[in-house]
Amino acid sequence: MLANYHTHTERCYHASGEDKEYVEAAIKAGLKVLGFSDHCPWIFEDDYVSRMRMHPSEVDAYFSALEALKKEYQKDIKLYIGFEAEYIRELIEAQDDFFENYPLDYLILGQHFLGPEYKAPYMGMPVNQEEILKEYVDSIIEGIESGRYLYLAHPDLIYFTGKPEIYDKHMTRLCKKMKQMEILLEFNILGMNDHRNYPSKRFLEIAKKVGNSYILGIDAHAPEQILDQKAIRQAEKICNSYGIKYIDGLNLLG
């Protein structure tokens, strides 16, 4: 593995470690590219304060700290600065305006919620309603069609417990659209290591049938996760067992 674009920082309130520790872990692991993509801030209404993403007031420090590390380690590794973001139609324009004057390299789409988190369910909790699954897929497709996102993080995060044929119908639709638009799907190593509902074997079968391409994402919430070569090899082995083509993303941003 030569590149990882899915890296968090302690600013999201559920990760640990200094920014520099992530960079030094990546260099030690032999990565050529490290992208930071902490949970994006939103301009919420009603003065809501999130406890699972950085606040808008922390963004200046995020960019200044990482820009300094870019310079400090420019001979050792290529660093990029991005965010992992949901696509939430009612908030997206305010987010675009907020980011306009920052040197943002990329966004990855991670659809944790279908609306503002204080009034929308987390997609990693069990749901069995087809309308929620459909909305999840529709939101992702609309987000990708907007052209904002580099790739689709943990596409199978939604924990659907309804009829398998319903899951297959909507997730096949998702996979076909991502293939059509040449969008990579992420094999999420954190989800694999934590034995979450994703990466989903059922979804991997669908992606294999459709012919989607993947990228490995560590989804690092601690520096030591970047050094976990055993987990990375296991992820590669699973992808290979499904005959899924994956890339390391080395030239993804040039």
Image: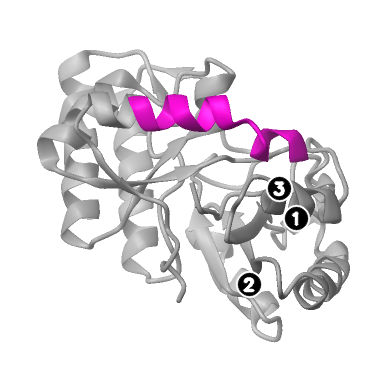
Judge whether 19 appears above or below 170 on screen: below
Mark 1 crowdedness (10 Å alpha carbons): few <14, some 14-19, many ≥20: many
Q: Is residue 39 above or below residue 170?
A: below
Camera-nearest label, 3 or 2 = 3
Instruction: Give amino acid for label 1.
Output: Val
Determine which residue is flagged by label 2.
94
For residue 126, above or below residue 240: above
As measured in the structure, the alpha-carbon distance from the residue carrying label 1 to the one carrying label 3 is 9 Å
Q: Which residue corresponds to the image point at 46% horizontal and 18% vertical from the top-left?
A: 197
Residue 221 on the magenta span: no
SS category of the residue bearing label 3: helix
As drawn, the label of residue 6 is none
Q: Residues within 10 Å of mark 3 (few under 14, many from 20)?
A: few
Q: Position of residue 1 (x, y in %)?
A: 48, 46
Front-most of residues 51 and 219:
219
Q: Main secondary structure of the magenta part?
A: helix
State the CA–CA distance, disc 3 to disc 2: 39 Å
Question: Bounds of the magenta span?
Answer: 223-237
Is 233 part of what is drawn in magenta? yes
For discs 1 and 3, the disc positioned in front in the rendered view: 3
